[in-house]
Amino acid sequence: MSTFSQRRLSQVASALRTATAEASSPALAANAAAAAKPAAQIALVGAGSWATGWHLPHLDANPDCDIAAIVEMGDEHRAAMGEQYGCPTFATFEELIASDVQVDGVLISSPHRTHFDLGMMAIDAGYNVLIEKPMTVSAEEAQTLVDAAKAGGKIFMVSRCTVSTISLCLSMSS
Ligand SMILES: NC(=O)c1ccc[n+]([C@@H]2O[C@H](COP(=O)([O-])OP(=O)(O)OC[C@H]3O[C@@H](n4cnc5c(N)ncnc54)[C@H](O)[C@@H]3O)[C@@H](O)[C@H]2O)c1
């Protein structure tokens, strides 16, 4: 992976912090242990222009997470992304859910019209969810997703809320 050495350096630094803190203070040791918790396993769905230029490089550079899988419909692009990030890839979200890949959270960055179905599948699968804006293509779909997310009890977030989206969310939650 392109940032393997960066991630490895971060893991070594984290282990050093833990050892140093343990030697000096139990409270510091507890903080350092919390910082050294396992990386979150994040699957990316929809590796288009936005995810390729923004989400995937940021996930890859973040020592607190691993790119657990990439779901992308486009065959050539899927293969290229899998090779670049060294992770399993799937042509459909259903295939990922049916696989034995461990996923803590899913980042949905596919076209707007697909957000509702993929979001509902992610909630049903028990994943934490970050979905790109716009959340859905209708208020009814958005409300259904919010209701399902509340019932599911996992984290559900919409990326880069604009003022209008925040207003919609506030009105939906009242
Ligand atoms: N937060 C921001 O500032 C910001 C910026 C740009 C785009 N976006 C949002 O990100 C989302 C994606 O935008 P984009 O410009 O990357 O679009 P895009 O068309 O370039 O990419 C979408 C990708 O999703 C794939 N895809 C389509 N349906 C799929 C499915 N069912 N399963 C798996 N993959 C599927 C396509 O093959 C494509 O590669 C949109 O909702 C857009 O509004 C947000």
Image (spheres, helix red, strand yellow):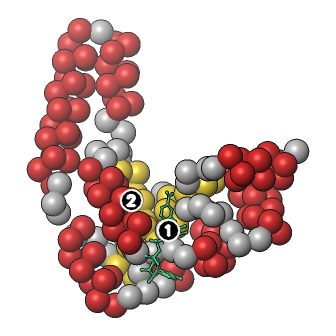
Q: Amino acid at mark 1?
A: Ser
Q: Disc 2 designates what residue?
A: 55
Q: Residue furthest front?
A: 163
Image position of 37 (left or right of 130):
left
Residue 29, position in %: x, y?
31, 19
Which residue is found at the position 29% from the left and 58% from the top?
Answer: 57
* Residue 3 in which image quadrant: bottom left
Looking at the rendered image, the quarter that the N terminus falls into is bottom left
* Residue 130 in which image quadrant: bottom right
Q: Nearer the viewer, residue 107 or 48?
A: 48
Q: Is 110 drawn above or below residue 68 in the view shown?
A: below
Q: Amino acid at mark 2?
A: His
Which residue is found at the position 30% from the left and 83% from the top?
Answer: 77
Looking at the rendered image, the quarter that the C terminus falls into is top right
* Residue 75 in which image quadrant: bottom left
* Some atom of ligand 1 lies within 8 Å of the CB belonging to the residue at label 1: yes
Residue 150, position in %: x, y?
75, 53
The answer to which of marks 1 and 2 sits earlier in the sequence is 2
Which residue is found at the position 78% from the left and 53% from the top?
Answer: 168
Q: Disc 1 designates what residue?
A: 109
What is the C-alpha distance between the residues marked 1 and 2? 9 Å
Q: Is residue 148 visible?
A: no
Image position of 72 (left or right of 20):
right
Image position of 158 (left or right of 63):
right
Q: Nearer the viewer, residue 8 or 114?
A: 114
Q: Are marks 1 and 2 in contact (CB under 8 Å)?
A: yes
Assign a secondary structure to mark 2: helix
Q: Is 21 drawn above or below residue 42 in the view shown?
A: above
Which residue is found at the position 20% from the left and 47% from the top?
Answer: 7
Q: Is 156 drawn above or below residue 112 in the view shown?
A: above
